[in-house]
Image: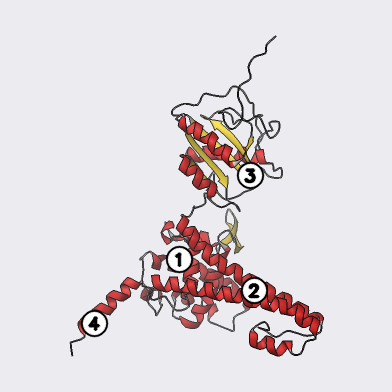
Amino acid sequence: MVGKPQPKMGADSQEPSAKPLAQPQPSCGGGQLVRAGKNPDIGPGTLVMLGLDVHLKQIAVVRQIDHSMPQPAQRMDQTELLTWVGKMIHAGAKVFSCYEAGCFGYVLHRLLTEAGVENLVVAPEAWCGAVKTDKRDARELCLRRERYHAGNRRALCVVRVPTVEEEAARSAGRQRERLLKERMRAEKRGASLLLLTGIKAPKGWWRPAAWKKLSAKLSERPRREAGLWQEQALQYETLQSAAKKELEKESAAAHASLPGGVGHLTWRLLSGEILSWERFKNRQEVASYTGLCPRENSSGEHRKTGPINRQGNPRVRTLLIEAVWRLARYEKDWRGFKKFPALLDKSTGSRRRRKAVAAAARLLAIDLWRLATGQTTTAKLGLSREFRGPEASGRAAASVTERVPPA
């Protein structure tokens, strides 16, 4: 007796894959099991939600069609996913998807966008509490993508995807940071190796002049072993210095003048991390991005604030705090020091100064945002040096030339 023909399954069809991850499980919030019933037809106007849990070799995908129950999770690679999605779009479906930001960058996002998918890259979370599996994460992402599409903007924390140019500019600054860390690693390893022989290496021992004096005092084995780390430290420092000069050159070409304490390197690194100052709509968004806002535990009339939440970009926090200490040296009339005078009072305790510098760094981020978007001037902020680009410098030089009478 001839059995009924089996429908074609897998990435080349619009049916669920023949490789389900496991038996359906309840969602993290409880509820019913996922039932793989008859697959709704996909045609013009069909609403498709996809939750993607991305890994190196495979992607776990959960699909929801027209607000129905999510289908069982499927495994597929990137090529199969794009082919599968392309068939749904060709059939006239509107496809929406999301996946968590991670070490794979934004390549998949750009491929999905080119295919016609409205994709979101979201901040990672513990979606299902203590129980974590790929299919549970993909299912929760799918359900939250549906709520986000329906208008609940709190369902997902969306990450701003940089353009290719913005990503390249940010990567240049981070590459210089990696080179600096590698130089410091080689320096510390060489110093610890010398310490085993009873020699405390001085600061900057790996530099050519210092190493020449130090190596003359070493026996053959320590000189050979420490010399390996000295060569690496010197090599990384050469690469780091070249990258630093290139970044400063780019910033100087874009801005002829910057406030004292905010040098060309700091501004270039900050701009690279933030991507675009115009992304922020108000000062609350700027402060939130820095992660310098205090934690709060309030109920009724009771209000208690704690340390900073550290929820933003850690590199931006470091750059801002370093800039505040430099402003305390070069720009003492900045309005932040009037609000937080403890920063200029050396008799103040270190704990109080640490709290003040975090608050001042948050204020500095807001001031730099206002300067970059043309909402204020350095004079209003109490800064002595102007903030202007090369075109403004050229106009100023031209106006001076016009006022000078001919000889």
User: Label 4, on which residue?
Assistant: 401
CA gap between label 2 and label 1 equals: 33 Å
Q: Amino acid at mark 4?
A: Thr
CA gap between label 4 and label 1 equals: 36 Å
Say what secondary structure mark 1 lies in.
Answer: helix
User: For residue 211, which quarter of the picture?
Assistant: bottom right
CA gap between label 4 and label 2 equals: 48 Å
The structure residue drawn at horizontal position 56% and vertical position 60%, both measured from the top left corner, is 312
Q: Do the residues under discs 4 and 1 have CB atoms within 8 angstroms?
A: no
Q: Amino acid at mark 1?
A: Ile
Q: In this rendering, which labeled residue sits more in front, label 4 or label 1?
A: 4
> Mark on residue 183?
2
Q: In this rendering, which labeled residue sits more in front, label 4 or label 2?
A: 2
Mark 2 is surrounded, within 10 Å at the Cα level, by few (under 14), some (14 to 19) or many (20 or more) other residues, namely many
Q: Which mark is first along the chain, 2 or 3?
A: 3
The location of residue 366, given as percent across then percent down, is 45, 66
- Image vertical order of residue 58 relative to residue 375, above or below: above
Name the residue at the top extreme: 1
The structure residue drawn at horizontal position 59% and vertical position 51%, both measured from the top left corner, is 104
CA gap between label 3 and label 2 equals: 39 Å
User: Label 1, on which residue?
Assistant: 366
Q: Is residue 184 among what the camera can see?
A: yes
Say what secondary structure mark 4 lies in.
Answer: helix
Q: Which mark is first along the chain, 1 or 3?
A: 3
The location of residue 21, given as percent across then percent down, is 68, 35
Q: Which mark is first along the chain, 1 or 4?
A: 1
- Image vertical order of residue 373 relative to residue 90, above or below: below
Q: Amino acid at mark 3?
A: Trp
Q: Which mark is first along the chain, 2 or 4?
A: 2
For the rendered model, the colour scheme is: secondary structure
Mark 4 is surrounded, within 10 Å at the Cα level, by few (under 14), some (14 to 19) or many (20 or more) other residues, namely few
> Mark on residue 127?
3
